[in-house]
Image: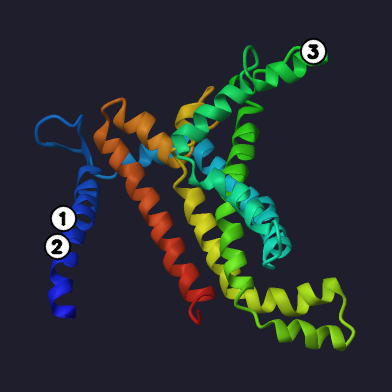
Amino acid sequence: MLLLCLPPALLLFTLFVALPMGEAAWYSFFRWNGFGQPSEWIGLRNFERVLANPAFHTALLNNGLIILVSLLVQLPLALGLAVLLADRLRGTQGFRLIFFLPYILAEIAAGLIWRFVYDGDYGLLARIFGAFGATAPQLLAEPELAMYAILVVIVWKYFGFHMVLYIAGLQQIDRHLYEAARIDGAGAWQLFRLVTVPLLAPTIRLSVFFAILGSLQLFDLIMPLTKGGPSDSTQTMVSFLYNYGVTRMQIGFGSAVGVVLFVLCVGFAFGYKRLLMKQD
C-alpha cells in the first residue's frame, strides 16, 4: 500500500513544492522582471539589496514583535480560557464556539471587518468616540499606531485555535491526578503549576511552534488592513516580498526575499523540533 501511495505524493511534492523552491532560488541570482528567460546574472546582489533595505529591517522587527505578542499575550490568553472551558459543563460548548469563530473566519474577511472597525470617520471606533463628543484617531493611518492595531487583530484572530489545542490536551489528562493532588492539599495554583503545565507541555510546545511559524509567514491580515503601510510601518517579510517583488515586477529581488524567508522558517522548524520536540 505504501508503494502505491508514495509515488503520487512524491510527484505532487516535487511539482508544487520542490521545483518552485528551486526555481525561486535560481531566479534570486538574476535581475529579472518576470518576462522571458532570466539572463542578467548578478550573483548575490539581490540578497545585498534585501539586507540593506530599511523596509526589510522594519518587516523583520514587525515579525519579531508579532512573535513576542503571540508568546506573551495570545498563548497565555488561550491557555487561561482553555483551563476555564476544558470541563464539559453546561454552557462551555457555546463559549468555545464563540472564541473559535474568529479563527474560522477568512483572513481577508477579518481584515476588512477590522478595517471598518478602525475607520476614524465612519467605523465602529468613530461611533464610540462620537458618543463621547471626541474625534476618533485614524489608527491604520498613523505609522506609530498601525502595527499595534494590527497586533490586536492578530490576537483576536488566532487565540481560538490555540485554545482548542489546549482544551484537547487538557481533556487527555487523567482527572484522578487532580483528585490525588487535592487530597494532598494542593490549591488551584499548585494544581495548575505542578499538574496541568507539566502534563500539557507537549501541547504547549506544539502551540508555540505553530505560533512562531505562523507569525513569520503572516500576510493575509496585513493586505486588507494596511497593505504594509503607512510608510512601510506594518510590513512583514511576506508583505515586503509581495510589495517590493511581485507588484514592482522585480522577480529576482522577490525571489531573494523568499529564499531568506525560507531559510528562516526551515532553520527554525528543524532547530525547534530537534531541541524541544524530539521526544514528542
In the rendered structure, which amino acid carries the disc numbered 2? Answer: Leu
Other residues around mark 1 within 10 Å, as few (<14) / some (14–19) / many (≥20)? few
Judging depth in this view, the residue of 158 and 145 nearest the camera is 158
Quick check: can you spot residue 161? yes
Percent across and percent down for residue 279 are 50, 82
Q: Position of residue 123 (x, y in %)?
A: 63, 18
Is disc 3 surrounded by few (<14), some (14 to 19) or many (20+) residues within 10 Å? few
Q: Is residue 99 left or right of residue 278?
A: right
Q: Are marks 2 and 1 in contact (CB under 8 Å)?
A: yes
- Residue 109 locus on image (x, y percent): 47, 33
Question: What label sits on residue 15 in the rendered view?
Answer: 1
Q: On the image, which quarter does residue 130 sit in?
A: top right
The residue pinned by badge 2 equals 11
Q: Position of residue 211 (x, y in %)?
A: 54, 56
User: Split into 4 quadrants, where in the image is the N terminus?
Assistant: bottom left
What residue lies at 51% left-to-right and 49% top-to-bottom? Answer: 215
Identified by mark 1, the residue type is Leu
Q: CA distance from mark 1 to mark 3?
A: 57 Å
Residue at the spot of label 3: 134
Extreme residue toward the front, this view: 90
Q: Neighbour class for label 2 at 10 Å: few (<14), some, many (≥20)?
A: few
Say what amino acid the circle numbered 3 marks.
Ala
In this picture, residue 258 sits left or right of residue 133: left
Q: Is residue 228 visible?
A: no
Element at label 1:
helix
Instruction: Decide: is 8 above or below 239.
Output: below
Q: CA distance from mark 2 to mark 1?
A: 6 Å
Q: Secondary structure at mark 2?
A: helix
Q: Secondary structure at mark 3?
A: loop
Residue shown at 53%/56% (left/top)? 212
